[in-house]
Image: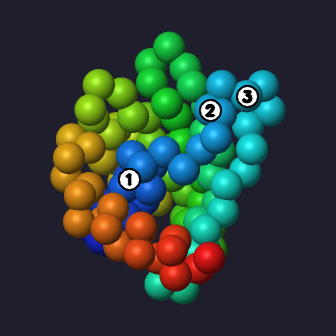
């Protein structure tokens, strides 16, 4: 579960978005190690909010602000510095390049 949380947060921290301030947020999708991720991005006064699902029925809502990730992943509260996601970022980058 910890790997999933870090992976999800790393995807968030990488900011796979074109325009988070869009009026109707675009749904972003990707797959990694057989898990399908789908999320939207909204810019708020408290930070950038990522809401979505991973796998069948597991939800997340993460806010990235001031170098920190706060929120919930599959009902669990998470809070850690964005810098903790470095290893997962490399995995995500590899997966995205492989899927192109």
Q: Residue at x 67, y 55 (%)?
A: 28
Give the residue pinned by disc 1: 9
Whole-angstrom CA distance, mark 1 to mark 3, is 21 Å
Question: In terms of secondary structure, where does tag 2 sit?
Answer: loop
Mark in the foreground, 2 or 1: 2
As drawn, 64 above or below 54: above
Q: Residue at x 34, y 38 (%)?
A: 70
Q: Residue at x 52, y 71 (%)?
A: 96
Question: In terms of secondary structure, where does tag 1 sit?
Answer: helix
Residue 69 in sight in this render: yes
Give the residue pinned by disc 3: 22
Asked if labels 1 and 2 touch by Cβ distance under 8 angstroms, the answer is no
Mark closer to the chain start, 2 or 1:
1
Residue 55 in sight in this render: no
Question: In terms of secondary structure, where does tag 3 sit?
Answer: loop
Give the residue pinned by disc 2: 20
Asked if labels 3 and 2 touch by Cβ distance under 8 angstroms, the answer is yes
Q: Residue at x 39, y 34 (%)?
A: 64
């Amino acid at each position: 579960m910890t790997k999933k949380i870090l992976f999800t947060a790393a995807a968030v921290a990488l900011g796979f978005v074109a325009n988070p301030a869009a009026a109707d947020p675009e749904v972003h999708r990707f797959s990694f190690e057989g898990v399908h991720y789908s999320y939207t991005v909204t810019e708020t006064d408290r930070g950038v909010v990522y809401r979505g699902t991973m796998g069948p029925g597991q939800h997340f809502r993460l806010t990235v602000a001031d170098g920190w990730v706060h929120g919930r992943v599959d009902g669990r509260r998470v809070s850690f510095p964005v810098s903790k996601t470095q290893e997962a970022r490399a995995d995500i980058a590899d997966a995205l390049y492989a899927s192109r």
